Image: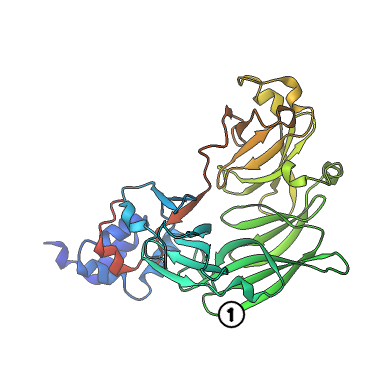
Amino acid sequence: MGMHAIPDELLELILLRLGSPVFLLRAASACKRWRRIVAGAGFLGRFRSLNGPAAVAVGVFRQTRPPSFVRSSTLNDRHFSLDFLPGGDATRPWPWRIMDSRGSLLLLDCLDPNGGQAMVVCEPATRRYRRIAPISSFREHVVRDVFLLDGDGREAGGGIIRVSNFKVLCVLYRCDRTSGRCYHHAGVLTPGKSRRKIEIKEAEDVIFLGATSSSVYWHVGGGTMLALDRSRVELSSFALPNAEDFDDDRIFPILHLTLIASRRDGEARIIVSKGGGNLKVFARINGSGEWALEKNIQLSVVAQGLKGYYPWYFDKPARISCIEATPTIKVTPWESFGSWQFYLDVDTGKAELGSSSGVDTTYPCELPWPPVMRACTEFPLNV
């Protein structure tokens, strides 16, 4: 009795219990019958309901010229080339630049031949892309930051983001020449020509702190922060405790403030650098809207074994910056005049010497879900 004797209904139950989307894609590539069942109406939704979000990381894109792909599996690099983008070769004066990634999608921009700004959202695994309405459609505004958000609707286990269903958030500002005040807005673009504008906050400045897979964060003055939920496209504000930590840092707060994604839970940690070499690490309390001090890190303790260390390096607040999508920050003491710096893993407290050279911003990339079954059978997914 072979596999062909198993009824479709029983085979569907077996495939639903494979547990991993990688195993499911391999099964769909085995034969036409299995692919037909996996591609059947409702199957992928039931699979996601049983097994949770089907996120399969395949590698990262690096911000090189042009952008390059570094695989974390046995997938062939050529399946993630960006040569299908319009004018996407390295010889053009202004090649495509990656702005953000989410799921299987990349957000890129470049200068067009007329001096404007072109934007696309693409899915490298399926070689599809969508052009985005020009940012210039928000007249008299200057763009600060750009991010990918989930599209409309939700599925079991999370939001939906596909090459045909996504949103792009543009953080914009406009300064009133008469009053001198700056007005910040969130401009939301969709795959079509739809666009809308939401006022964020009237403030002297809105400074981007960092992003996790679930939220984007800004500092808007003092101990007040803004958070945007990337799935629900909802803005909220919160205040860190001990607001006096920011009273003595009115000029360059961004140099002493950053955000990381913890390796333990993927959630954000806000780091504040204080005088005396003290780092304060704040975390959200049990997923609520309140934040509390999680721990203190004494830089003079974690760095004292490093070559070139001097105790007086940490009399003033050290400059700190995050390494994208990691729990690591770069620490540069003011007293070293930029000649000495090290990297600190905030999760483990481990410090290592290093320089800024060779540290690239990376953008994670996943396999598309639900998979395009035709694409899945055109090349082997040896993951």
**Crowd around label 1: few <14 · some 14–19 · many ≥20 (10 Å):** few
User: Would you say 377 lies left or right of 255 here?
Assistant: left
From where the camera sits, is residue 10 visible?
no
Q: Quadrant for residue 37, please give it.
A: bottom left
Q: Quadrant for residue 249, please give it.
A: top right
Q: Residue at x 58, y 65 (%)?
A: 231
From where the camera sits, is residue 34 visible?
yes
Counting from the top left corner in percent of width and height, residue 32 is at 20, 69
Q: Residue furthest bottom?
A: 193
Q: Residue at x 53, y 63 (%)?
A: 109
Quadrant location, the N terminus:
bottom left
Q: Quadrant for residue 140, please give it.
A: bottom right
Above or below 71: residue 374: below
Q: Residue furthest left?
A: 1
Counting from the top left corner in percent of width and height, residue 100 is at 54, 58
Above or below 273: residue 377: below
User: Would you say 169 lies left or right of 366 here?
Assistant: right
Of 156 and 313, nearer the camera is 313
Q: Residue furthest right?
A: 179
Above or below 287: residue 359: above
Of 221 and 290, nearer the camera is 221
The residue carrying mark 1 is 194
Circle 1: residue type:
Ser
Q: Residue at x 82, y 69 (%)?
A: 176
Counting from the top left corner in percent of width and height, residue 334 is at 74, 32
Circle 1 SS class: loop
Counting from the top left corner in percent of width and height, residue 330 is at 62, 37
